Amino acid sequence: MKARLAVTACALAALVSGPAHAQSTLDAVKSKGYVQCGVNTGLAGFSQPDSRGVWKGIDVDACRAVAAAVFGDASKVRYTPLTAQQRFTALQSGEVDVLARNTTWTITRDTGLGLNFVGTNYYDGQGFMVPKKLGVTSAKQLNGATICVQPGTTTELNLADYFRANRMSFKPVVIEKLEEVVNAYFAGRCDVYTTDVSGLVSVRASRAQNVADHVILPEVISKEPLGPVVRHGDDRWFDVVKWSLIATIEAEEMGLSSKNIDQNLSSTNPAIQRFVGATGDIGKQLGLENRWAYNIVKQVGNYGESFEANLTPLGFDRGLNRLWTQGGLMYAPPVR
């Protein structure tokens, strides 16, 4: 009987402590007055400081959306640049509140590392880039090639799987920091650079002396759904970050943008009324103000605006990242 009572007491304690723990990150963020966001050390279009030191990119916008939702001020973010090997430890330890660093959603990361992916803000896949002068037109021609790759990534694992499956060999040049691995490729230390295709497009557009001198091969060898990440065990914070991302996609679906959101404050459309906080208590359910989604769109923009501002100038095509109504995979659960 004592053992049964002890088990019951433990179960009750877990139930009582659960909600308090679930709100801890949101409370801590509100208390310190900013969101600490883990980002890439510098990947154009995703997260990179400009010449004035202002961070920009679609991952940066994901963090800014959270700040707009929580504080009504998208500028209340501080950024922690992280390498691929540093990123998960920084999130697990609480050094950052959210990780928005072109990170692939996998079952191992979602379970074994104690993380929660809030959604996908860029659908991607791994590819290969080679100097045009090599005359290579297919990844099947890379047998024996020297390949630059970053450690601690799905890229490294996919590379080994692909070459093993195709009975080819390669010589890895493994370098942790993005800047150094990119420098190694352009200096000719390796024949091939492999990473997500988005990373290849970004690096070629922002770093190559002549874009035409480098070819991205046609093979895409993996699925790489990239998105923001939070820690397990904090459902309230998970909800806030998740719905902040969803709001940007939902806004584009509804035709709401930073340019017309104010005009829609008086809309008679019930869905828009809920979205901008004119009716209902959706914000309160998240522990936020009811105009949380309005603040995101007004200050950060919808998903399409973020894509156009950060990725389109680098030559990115939306492809899979079009709205589902336009043949893509971007589909938002309803804000209602």
Image (cartoon, helix red, strand yellow):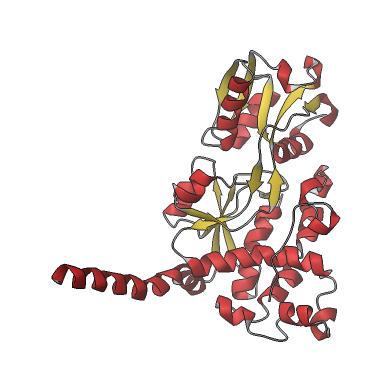
Placement of the C terminus among the 4 image quadrants: bottom right
- Residue 57 lies left or right of residue 316; in this view the side is left
Q: Is residue 1 left or right of residue 128?
A: left
View extreme (front): residue:
1
Q: Nearer the viewer, residue 42 or 16?
A: 16
Image x and y of residue 81, in percent:
56, 48
Question: On the picture, is 162 further left or further right than 260?
Answer: left
Is 23 placed above or below 307 here?
A: below
Q: Residue at x 60, y 15 (%)?
A: 169
Point 55% across, 31% down: residue: 157
Q: Is residue 271 visible?
A: yes
Above or below 188: residue 297: below
Where residue 15 appears, as percent x and y from the top left, is: 36, 73
Residue 257 shows up from this direction:
no
Q: Position of residue 208 (x, y in %)?
A: 77, 31
Q: Residue at x 82, y 86 (%)?
A: 266
Q: Using the rendered view, name the quadrant where residue 242 is placed.
A: bottom right
- Location of the N terminus by quadrant is bottom left
The residue drawn where x is 35% and y is 76% is 16
Residue furthest to the left in view is: 2
